[in-house]
């Protein structure tokens, strides 16, 4: 279940089938199916907006599981609920928020382990702040803020989030992840580590908690930093399993940014298989790195047919101008011939 599902279920249970989106608020939202319902649900739980009963007219711009969102116009279909900014609303339908909060998914939880924060350079810390904002946006595309936990939260991270004036409900803990798990005792916990000996499998996607190392190696390579965290936290004594994200058995080209890793896991859990989710999250640079890796494996003893290269590129979703660009570059790195 997504957060959007919880909102729609709440509306349906309470007998509502339509919501009016006033024109003055429309520019804040993207009319993209489930995404619009998800964004409205997030804003409701954050207290940015309210829903009140009232008649409004307009034209449907999004529909999900029998509930319509209607953009306000002078004519059109009538709606039963109207979205209003919480700051100006006089009356709200509180049952919708309460029921949505009760029904919403609370798993999986993503814990960013920060025990090695102090080894990061200032540049790397600034990169973490950027990734955090994108990561929060990724979480909100499926779940709600409290499915993201930072443990332990460095004072400067708390200060930075405070400086942003960010309205959020991310869980910022003072205790370590190990101390947290000793109290709540989650059933299944997986630590995502590119150097883990075991690949993430479909069965791992049902884990209650995923741990990611709050490590940014933008300036200095730290290949085993996540494993170091695993040892420091003594996760082995808690049966925390280490898993790596791999595409066709290799980590080459697999994104390692925090937001991308979470995006892959959530996509795979709800929508696609792991390989498809990885490919969809890869940048052109990631895909080209993987294309070079795959073609070099095949061309060690003889030139490679162009059609074989194209087949690999197709699996990596390289098409159009990106495909043309990749083929031009690959010919400089690998012996490619027409067959």
Image (cartoon, rainbow, N blue to C red):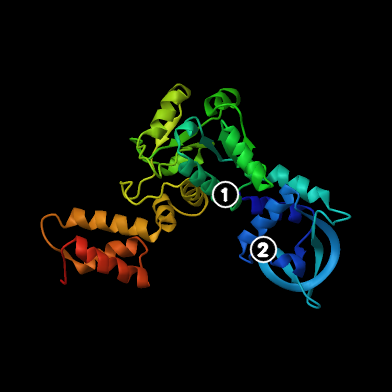
Q: CA distance from mark 2 to mark 1?
A: 18 Å
Residue 259: where, in percent of width, then height? 50, 48
Q: Is residue 7 left or right of residue 110?
A: right
Q: Is residue 99 left or right of residue 335?
A: right
Q: Quadrant of the C terminus?
A: bottom left
> Under tag 1, what secondary structure?
helix
Residue 270: where, in percent of width, then height? 52, 51
* Residue holding disc 1: 133
**Picture residue at 37% right of the left edge, 61% below the top:** 284
Frontmost residue, 312 versus 22 = 22
Residue 80: where, in percent of width, then height? 82, 63
Residue located farthest toward the left when viewing the structure as drawn: 301
State whether residue 228 is above or below residue 313.
Answer: above
Q: Is residue 298 left or right of residue 130?
A: left
Q: Is residue 204 visible?
A: yes
Answer few, some or many: residues within 10 Å of disc 1's Cα (few below 14, many 20 plus, some between 14 and 19).
few
User: Viewer-nearest of labels 2 and 1?
Assistant: 1
Residue located farthest toward the right when viewing the structure as drawn: 90
**Picture residue at 40% right of the left edge, 29% below the top:** 228
> Under tag 2, what secondary structure?
loop
* Residue holding disc 2: 29
Q: Is residue 69 visible?
A: no
In terms of image quadrants, where is residue 325? Answer: bottom left
**Picture residue at 62% right of the left edge, 60% below the top:** 34
């Amino acid at each position: 279940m997504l957060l959007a599902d919880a909102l729609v279920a709440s509306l349906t249970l309470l007998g509502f089938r339509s919501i009016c989106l006033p024109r003055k608020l429309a520019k804040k939202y993207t009319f993209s199916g489930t995404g619009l319902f998800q964004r409205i649900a997030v804003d409701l739980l954050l207290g940015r907006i309210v829903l009140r009963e009232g008649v409004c007219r307009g034209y449907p711009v999004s529909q999900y599981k029998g509930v319509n969102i209607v953009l306000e116009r002078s004519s059109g279909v009538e709606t039963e609920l109207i979205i209003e900014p919480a700051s100006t609303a006089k009356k709200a339908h509180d049952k919708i928020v309460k029921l949505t909060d009760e029904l919403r998914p609370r798993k999986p939880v993503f814990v960013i382990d920060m025990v090695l924060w102090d080894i990061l350079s200032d540049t790397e810390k600034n990169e973490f702040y950027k990734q955090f904002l994108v990561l929060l946006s990724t979480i909100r595309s499926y779940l709600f803020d409290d499915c993201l936990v930072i443990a332990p939260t460095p004072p400067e991270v708390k200060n930075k989030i405070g400086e942003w004036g960010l309205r959020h409900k991310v869980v910022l803990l003072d205790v370590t992840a190990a101390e947290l798990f000793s109290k709540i005792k989650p059933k299944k916990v997986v630590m995502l580590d590119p150097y883990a000996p075991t690949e993430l499998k479909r069965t791992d996607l049902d884990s209650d908690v995923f741990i990611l190392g709050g490590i940014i190696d933008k300036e200095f390579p730290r290949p085993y930093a996540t494993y170091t965290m695993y040892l420091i936290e003594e996760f082995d004594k808690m049966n925390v399993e280490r898993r790596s994200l791999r595409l066709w058995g290799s980590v080459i080209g697999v994104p390692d940014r925090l937001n991308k890793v979470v995006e892959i896991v959530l996509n795979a859990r709800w929508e696609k298989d792991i390989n498809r989710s990885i490919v969809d999250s890869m940048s052109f640079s990631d895909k080209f790195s993987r294309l070079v890796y795959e073609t070099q494996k095949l061309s060690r003893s003889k030139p490679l047919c162009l059609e074989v290269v194209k087949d690999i590129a197709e699996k990596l979703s390289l098409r159009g101008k990106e495909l043309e660009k990749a083929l031009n570059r690959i010919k400089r790195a690998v012996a490619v011939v027409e067959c």
